[in-house]
Image (cartoon, helix red, strand yellow):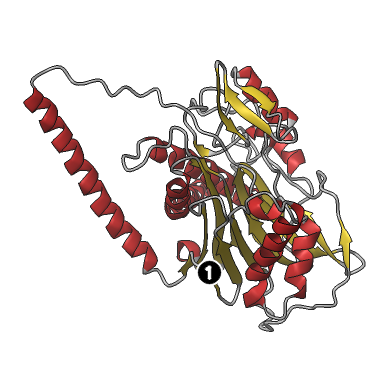
Amino acid sequence: MGSCLSNESRSPVPGSPLGVRKKKSLKKRSISRNSSLEFRRDDQLRRIPERMFLNGSSKIASLFMQQGKKGVNQDAMVVWENFGSRLDTVFCGVFDGHGPFGHMVAKRVRDSLPSRLSAHLEVCSKADEVLREISLNKTCSINSDTTSVLSADEDSIFSSIAVEDPDKETQIIKTFKESFLKAFKFMDRELKTHTNFDCFCSGTTAVTLVKQGQHLVIGNVGDSRAVIGTRDNDDSLIAVQLTLDLKPSLPAEAARIKKCRGRIFALQEEPEVARVWLPNNNSPGLAMARAFGDFCLKDFGLISVPDITYRNLTNKDEFVVLATDGIWDVLSNEDVVNIVASVPTRSSAARAVVQSAVRAWRFMYPTSRVDDCAVVCLFLDSDSNNNNNLSASSSYSTTAMSKENIVSNECNNSEITEKD
């Protein structure tokens, strides 16, 4: 993804050499103390029985990750069942780091973002309960006056959702949306102040989801992707892309970047890959329009605001696949859904996708190095169907991505910045 130069000064502090050494000593002690705190926090995360971040599977999920041939593995993944201490809730995410410290950034976001999201969801839920109680006491709906849940534009975005209780449904959407936006914002701020690694020219993508009952909410930055396998009216298994690959080639993303004086162009040797560059320097050449970290570009159009997607799940929806671009560079949405549907057991689904992608890399790009690959498969009918086998004979057809397939929060475009 390229590199960029840091503008941070390392000039000596005025004063005696002893003072300089003392400051350096204090800094080392501070880093050591932070490392100790992080070790304890990481140890606590590893002890959570419902949290998986290594290759493996559970009743509802399959995870697999394989290092590529480009150096250290910069992908990360996580599945957290009983998320937020709720039996009906699960968090999933895959993260693709880039830059000198990309592997550290990806793991940091993997470990911190879910906890931040859970905390914001709890705060927002409690606030909603207070507002509803006040509303009932005043015998009027808080959603009918000046504090409407969705604007006119947002209402049209979510118009494809079929609901029995629209007021309740839109309140749930609002809670998830606010929580995702706040969690991503604070996550990026945490990275900016991190002392153990430099995020100036390093960052990560993140495609994350929360499934709570029949509600599926996805927050996405970068070019990792979420795809759902679902049944159409003919009962054929089809692939529906749930997220946009947030690349600089997208018109809305390009407009925001250019408005902020960032430059977009592709290198001669890879004319199909649009990259983001500094105004007066041919670096870092980032191949995505949104990411955590990469603070060298945050003043020039790169943002970490998530594109938020909502889907009301039905019994036609069978599984969701989250994967980094090492998968999507060589396999189509249809390929991936077909692979998952044809495996003999659900526990082998993610491994089968990765192995197919590695073979495709070697066939399609024999002179290129295989990219890191990370896949999470979340099965949606686990509560009602304990059968560990998938139908290998499912018929398959293609569904193009459209407004009906992707319910995207358009307010994440050029009007949103990281300045607030």
Rate crowding at label 1 as few (under 14), some (14 to 19) or many (20 or more) other CA atoms within 10 Å. Answer: some
Q: Amino acid at mark 1?
A: Asn
Q: Quadrant of residue 250?
A: top right
Q: Quadrant of residue 231?
A: bottom right
Q: Position of residue 311 (x, y in %)?
A: 71, 54
Q: Nearer the viewer, residue 68 or 375?
A: 68
* Residue in view at x 69 percent, y 73 percent: 381
Q: Is residue 333 left or right of residue 6?
A: right
Q: Position of residue 97 (x, y in %)?
A: 52, 46
Write down the residue under mark 1. 55
Residue 99 visible within the image: yes
Q: How many marks?
A: 1
Up-down relation of residue 202 to residue 372 (above or below) = above
Up-down relation of residue 71 to residue 20 (above or below) = below
Q: Position of residue 324 (x, y in %)?
A: 62, 53
* Residue in view at x 68 percent, y 25 percent: 265
* Residue in view at x 48 percent, y 51 percent: 117
- Locate the N terminus and report the quarter of the image it occupies: top right
Mark 1: which secondary structure?
loop
Q: Is residue 399 left or right of residue 321?
A: right
